[in-house]
Amino acid sequence: MMSRPCQTSCVPRPVLLKADYVIVGSGLTGSVIARALIDAGRDVLVVDRRDHVGGNVHDHDHESGIRVHTYGPHYFRTNSDRIWEFVTRFAEFFKYEASLKTLVDGKHENWPIAASYIAQHIGVDWKPKFTGTPTNFEEAALSLMPRVIYEKFIKEYNEKQWGVPADTLSADLCKRFDVREDGEPRLKPDCKYQGIPLLGYTHLMQQMIKDIPAKLNFDYLKRRDEIQADKLTIFTGPIDSLFDYKLGKLAYRGQKRKHSFQPGAGFAQPCGQVNTPMHSQGPSIRTLEWKHMMPRDKAERIPGTLLTTETPFSPTDSSAYEYPFPDDKNAELYRRYRELADDTEQVLVCGRLGEYRYFDMDQAIGRAMLLAERILRNAPDADRLPNG
Ligand SMILES: Cc1cc2nc3c(=O)[nH]c(=O)nc-3n(C[C@H](O)[C@H](O)[C@H](O)COP(=O)(O)OP(=O)(O)OC[C@H]3O[C@@H](n4cnc5c(N)ncnc54)[C@H](O)[C@@H]3O)c2cc1C
């Protein structure tokens, strides 16, 4: 019979890494908290299981010199002076106001949908097919637009995105788009500050955590016994993974990205993102052309263009988690994990994966600033924080 590894009598492995505050994850949430704690003179260590800092805002250069956002296109925007001052402390931004198109009946139409498109194809005196309080995504969408428009632009896009029928999705998802009465083509025309870091998001994040001790290729869950937080562990990974998925797995959608370089081409699309909503257009939901997301003069000097299609799937590997699944079952499961997290001493679970919420970058930064303030207000005496 094989002998089992001893549980009690062996000398425990020594703690190799130690800090008052251990931050798991170098994405925006972890890095903003780390920066605030270091600026306030605290002892901090950041660990990340990936081989790079920055979490999902990471970017890199393709061999052609075209900058690619590794985990999908990231357009920075905020109305907050404070958040804009914070990010521009670390990097210069160039102005970039995203405009998206949807490929419908072979033409590039505005996204969000222009009221003029509806007027042209349906007329102006259409009545919503649904009135009252919507109970699902389809009802919510039909209260905003005629059915035929919903079917061309939205229904199948969301079925591809989430992998389920549109009438099983949450009505709240409709809050992410509208019908543009004025035909404004920019995605967020009212946002005060919009842009992309001139030298890229990776540079921004490296600057943000410059001088902060950080260890990469370190999976906290696999190496917990090698690390010690004397005051608080701030965990920004998936909340269910922290508890070894003991209540079940929260569902996510991710995207498979397929890149194709077209040598010699100038620009292939009218804008950086073109949606392909119909099942008949294939399984991908959008095609990205990265050159549009670079300063124009630099992009024009690069011969060739890089296109990337994004095809949604349900990842089992948590490093591919992108969008929390918008339904009641997962909201309830998250609530139960949140109770466990709130009852865990000296651990704060936060960020888009820790709070099982889609945060835009500025929301992630704003939330992290708030949490850092709470940590600093409670420190050094209180070692337990409200997670909410
Ligand atoms: C496809 C896509 C497109 C987006 N586009 C935009 C956009 O255009 N504009 C916008 O404002 N926002 C956008 N966002 C949102 C933006 O990506 C988030 O706001 C941001 O990534 C949140 O940062 P975070 O630190 O909370 O999470 P993350 O960036 O995911 O960071 C979590 C970190 O924790 C690490 N980690 C996890 N588990 C462990 C572990 N066990 N041990 C060690 N490390 C671990 C991960 O490796 C990761 O680095 C987009 C998101 C997606 C998915």
Image (tube, rainbow, N blue to C red):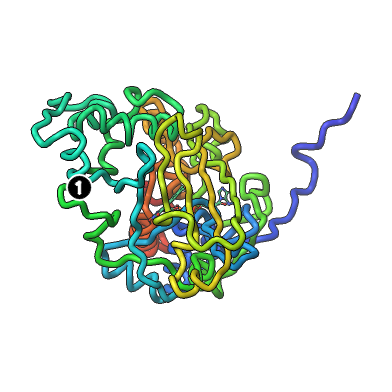
- Camera-side residue: 48 or 97? 97
Image coordinates for residue 173, horizontal then vertical, percent: 31, 37
- Tell me: 376 left or right of 34: left
Question: Mark 1 highlights which residue?
Answer: 180
Image coordinates for residue 213, horizontal then vertical, percent: 59, 68
Classify residue 145 by image quadrant: top left
Any part of residue 359 in sight: yes
Q: Quadrant of the N terminus?
A: top right
- Tell me: 352 left or right of 121: right
- Camera-side residue: 238 or 203? 203
Image coordinates for residue 236, horizontal then vertical, percent: 49, 50
**Image point (36%, 44%), residue name:** 107
Extreme-right residue of the structure: 1
Identified by mark 1, the residue type is Arg
**Image point (49%, 65%), residue name:** 201
Classify residue 206 by image quadrant: bottom right
- Camera-side residue: 283 or 5? 283
- Tell me: 140 left or right of 167: left
**Image point (40%, 62%), residue name:** 379
> Compared with residue 282, is residue 371 higher up or lower down, i.e. above or below?
below
